[in-house]
Image: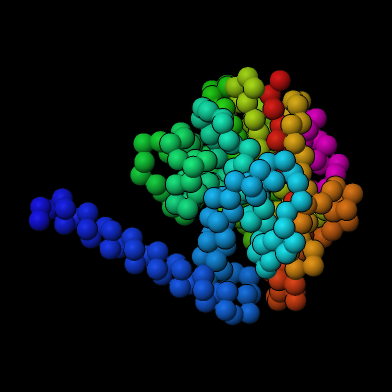
Amino acid sequence: MTVTEMIGRIKTVLTSNKNQERNDAADRFARGPKIPFSDGYTEFKEKLLTQVLADPGLMHTFRAGGPIPPGFGARLDERIVEYPWVLSRLSGSQGLILDAGSTFNKPALLSTEFLNGRRILVYTLETDWIRYDPRVSYIFGDLRQMILRDGVAATIACISTLEHVGFTYEYKTYSKRKPWPHAQPQSYLDAIREFRRVLGPGGHLLLTVPFGAYEDHGWLQQFDAAMVEKVKATFAGETCAETYYRYVDGGWTTSSAPDCAGLSYFNVHETGAFEEDGLAAARAVCCLDLRVG
C-alpha cells in the first residue's frame, strides 16, 4: 500500500467515524425530551435538513411558498424553514454567491447540489469554521460598509443576520442579556443599500428575518411589517417572492404577514426555560426574494 492510499484509507475511516458520531447524537436527541439546543440538537436538525434538501417535491413546495407538511420541524429553530426556502431559490442561478453572515459556511450545506461547485464569498464579522477550498473565500467586515466593487455578486443570501446589524460590539454580539448602549437599530437599511450596490443586473437578494411585533432585545431586533416595507423600498427592486412561516402547535407552517403580525420573539436568555411546544427562538420569519431591476 502506498502512502497516498494509506492516507486516503485513514481519511475514509475518520469520516465514517464522524458520520456515525453525528448519527448517534441525532438519535439521542430523537429519543429524549427534544429540548432545543441540548445534546444532539444540531445533528438532529442537520439530518432532517439533509433529507429535506434531497426531496425534490418538498423543495418545490418551499420554492413556491406552498403549505408544508403538518408538524414540520417540530422543536427546531427557524433555520429548518429558512435554509430550504433560500436554497430552493438558488436553483439554476449562476455567478458569485455572497453569504452575508456566514450561514452557508457548514459542511452539510456546502456539499449539497445547491452550493456544490458554486463560488461563494462569506462576508461576516466572525465565523467558527474555515473551509480550505478555492471556491470559498472569506472577508471579515461590516455589511454596512463592504469593501467590494459594484455589481460583483449574482446572489446575496442573508439568513437571519440583518436583525443583528447595528447590535454588535468588537465583532461579537454584545450580550444576549444586556443591551449594547451604542446600538444603531436603523442602520440595517445601510446594509440593504450595500446589498443593492454589490448585486449585478438581475441579481437576487434572498433575505430572512424574524417577524412579528417590533421588539428590541438588545442583541437583535424583531422586524415588523413596517420594517419589511422599508427593506423593500430601500432595495428598490422587484419582489419576486414574499413568504412567511410560523411556529404553531408544535411545528412550522406556511403563514401570512397578518397572521404573524402580533407574535413575539422567544428569548430563552430572558425566560431561562423553553416552552412545552419546543419553540426555540423566532415564532415567525419573513422570507424575501428581491431582484435588481
Tell me which corner region of the image, top left, top right, bottom left or bottom right, holds residue 11: bottom left
The N terminus lies in quadrant: bottom left
The C terminus lies in quadrant: top right
Count of numbered marks: 0
Q: Main secondary structure of the magenta part?
A: helix
Drawn side of residue 118 relative to residue 255, left or right: left
Q: How far across and how far down the image is residue 205, in percent? A: 66, 34
The structure residue drawn at horizontal position 52% and vertical position 41%, both measured from the top left corner, is 114
Q: How far across and how far down the image is residue 119, in percent? A: 46, 33
Is residue 230 shown above or below 105? above
Residue extending furthest bottom? 32
Q: How far across and how far down the image is residue 263, in percent? A: 84, 58
The structure residue drawn at horizontal position 46% and vertical position 35%, both measured from the top left corner, is 118
The structure residue drawn at horizontal position 54% and vertical position 50%, both measured from the top left corner, is 54
User: Quick one: 128 or 200, which is closer to the camera?
Assistant: 200
Is residue 215 shown above or below 156? below
The structure residue drawn at horizontal position 64% and vertical position 22%, both measured from the top left corner, is 202
Which residues lie in the magenta part?
A: 223-234
Tell me which corner region of the image, top left, top right, bottom left or bottom right, holds residue 203: top right
Is residue 142 shown above or below 168? above
* Residue 77 falls inside the magenta stretch: no
* Residue 225 falls inside the magenta stretch: yes
Q: How far across and how far down the image is residue 143, in percent? A: 60, 38
Residue extending furthest left? 1
Drawn side of residue 110 relative to residue 202, left or right: left
